[in-house]
Image: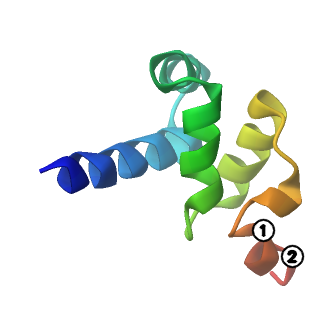
Amino acid sequence: MVNKFTNRRKSIVSRIFERGKLDDVLFIIVLYGKEETGKILQSNKYLNRQGIFLAHTLLGISLEGFKTYVTLKHN
C-alpha cells in the first residue's frame, strides 16, 4: 500500500513540475518540502527540460544532480 502511494506521489510531483502552473508548483514544494520534492525530481528518469530547469531554479539543485540531465545534454 505504501509503495502505491509513493509511486503516485512521484508521478504527481513530476507532472506538476512539467506541466503545472507556478502556483501549483509552489504548493507542491510547501506540501512535501524542498528536500523531499528535490529527491523525487532528481530520481525521476523521465523529467522533461522544463521540469529540470524549474526545479534547478526553485530548489537550487545542480543540473548534474538530475538523472535525466545526462540524456538531456545529448538532445
- Name the residue at the bottom extreme: 74
Instruction: Indicate whether 23 appears above or below 47.
Output: above
Instruction: Indicate whether 16 appears above or below 23.
Output: below
Residue positioned 80% across, 76% down in the render = 70
Q: CA distance from mark 1 to mark 2?
A: 6 Å
The answer to which of 1 and 26 lies nearer the viewer is 1
Total numbered circles: 2
Residue positioned 41% across, 50% down in the render = 10
- Horizontal arrangement in the rendering, residue 33 relative to residue 42 (left or right): left
Name the spot of residue 43 as percent of width and height, x first: 59, 60
Q: Amino acid at mark 1?
A: Tyr
Q: Which mark is residue 16?
A: none
Residue positioned 86% across, 62% down in the render = 64
Instruction: Indicate whether 36 appears above or below 65.
Output: above
Label 1: which secondary element: helix
Could you classify mark 1 by the number of other residues whose Cα lies within 10 Å: few (under 14), some (14-19), or many (20 or more)?
many
Q: Which residue is mark 2?
A: 73
Name the spot of residue 2 as percent of width and height, x first: 20, 48
- Horizontal arrangement in the rendering, residue 1 relative to residue 60 (left or right): left
Label 2: which secondary element: helix
Could you classify mark 2 by the number of other residues whose Cα lies within 10 Å: few (under 14), some (14-19), or many (20 or more)?
few
Q: Which quarter of the figure has residue 9?
A: top left
Q: Amino acid at mark 2?
A: Lys
**Is the image coloured rainbow, by chain, by secondary structure, or in one colour?**
rainbow
Q: Which residue is mark 1?
A: 69
Q: Which quarter of the figure has residue 63?
A: bottom right
Name the spot of residue 71 as percent of width and height, x first: 75, 80
The answer to which of 22 and 55 lies nearer the viewer is 55
Instruction: Indicate whether 31 appears above or below 58.
Output: above
Q: In the rendered structure, are the residues bearing label 1 and label 2 in contact, judged by CB atoms less than 8 Å apart?
A: yes
- Horizontal arrangement in the rendering, residue 60 relative to residue 20 (left or right): right
